[in-house]
Image (spheres, grey):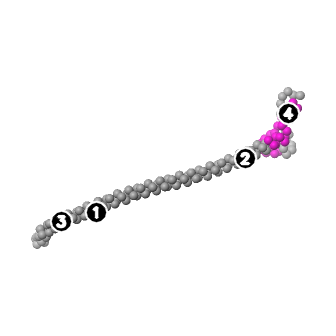
């Protein structure tokens, strides 16, 4: 009996070699003290289990990615809605400010105009005869 582990490369015959050769895996049978440590069926079973676990992991990863994308999309929509609301509130506040300022300026201009009209009317009433005579004098001359 040998005192160590040795490896033998499987021969390229039979479907087992061909199946795993397609996946670029070369199966080696290990023997320890003349007994097989891993039987071929155990190796195939383990590889199938690994493949199933890998597929499950990939499926979970895809599902998690979809959930994350959905959450990200929802968060982006919430942010867009929040920023739209903030911008609308700012625009409304600015519009109200401008409207109030314009109204105040209009009222001030109206008051100034009315005061000027009152002053002109008062001046005319106080100086009506004199202004009429000046106009007549200019026409005659």
Is residue 118 or residue 138 the one in the foreground? 118
Q: Residue at x 11, y 72 (%)?
A: 140
Residue 8 shows up from this direction:
no
Q: Which of marks 2 and 3 is nearer the N terminus?
A: 2
Query: Tag 4: Cα neighbours inside 10 Å, few (<14), some, or many (≥20)?
Result: some
Number of the front mark, 3 or 4? 3
Quarter location, residue 28: top right
Is residue 28 or residue 102 the one in the foreground? 102
Q: Do the residues labelled 3 and 4 touch (CB within 8 Å)?
A: no
> Secondary structure under badge 2?
helix
Q: Name the residue under label 2.
A: 56
The alpha-carbon separation of the residues under discs 2 and 3 comes to 97 Å
Side (left or right) of 106 relative to 39: left
Question: For residue 31, which numbered disc appears in the image?
Answer: 4
Q: How far across and down, in percent of the image, does residue 130 sit?
A: 11, 68
Number of the front mark, 4 or 1? 1
Query: Tag 2: Cα neighbours inside 10 Å, few (<14), some, or many (≥20)?
Result: few
Number of the front mark, 2 or 3? 3
Q: Earlier in the sequence, mark 3 or mark 4?
A: 4
Residue 106 shows up from this direction:
yes
The alpha-carbon separation of the residues under discs 2 and 1 comes to 79 Å
Magenta span has 104?
no
Q: Give the range drawn in magenta.
A: 18-46
Query: Tag 3: Cα neighbours inside 10 Å, few (<14), some, or many (≥20)?
Result: few
> Secondary structure under badge 3?
helix
Query: Tag 1: Cα neighbours inside 10 Å, few (<14), some, or many (≥20)?
Result: few
Q: Which residue is drawn at 70% across and 48% down?
A: 59
Q: Name the residue under label 1.
A: 110
Q: Mark 3 points at which residue?
A: 122
Q: Earlier in the sequence, mark 3 or mark 1?
A: 1
Q: How far across and down, in percent of the image, does residue 41 sit?
A: 84, 42
Q: Do the residues labelled 2 and 1 touch (CB within 8 Å)?
A: no
């Amino acid at each position: 009996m040998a005192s160590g582990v040795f490896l033998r490369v499987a021969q390229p015959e039979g479907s087992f070699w061909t199946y795993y050769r397609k996946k670029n895996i070369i199966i080696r049978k290990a023997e320890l003290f003349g007994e097989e440590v891993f039987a071929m069926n155990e190796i195939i079973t383990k590889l199938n289990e690994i493949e199933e676990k890998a597929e499950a992991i990939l499926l979970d990863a895809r599902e998690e990615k979809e959930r994350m994308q959905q959450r990200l999309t929802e968060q982006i929509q919430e942010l867009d809605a929040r920023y739209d609301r903030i911008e609308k509130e700012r625009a409304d506040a600015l519009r109200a400010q401008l409207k109030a300022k314009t109204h105040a300026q209009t009222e001030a201009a109206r008051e100034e105009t009315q005061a000027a009209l009152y002053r002109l009317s008062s001046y005319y009433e106080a100086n009506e005869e004199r202004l009429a005579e000046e106009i007549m004098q200019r026409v005659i001359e």
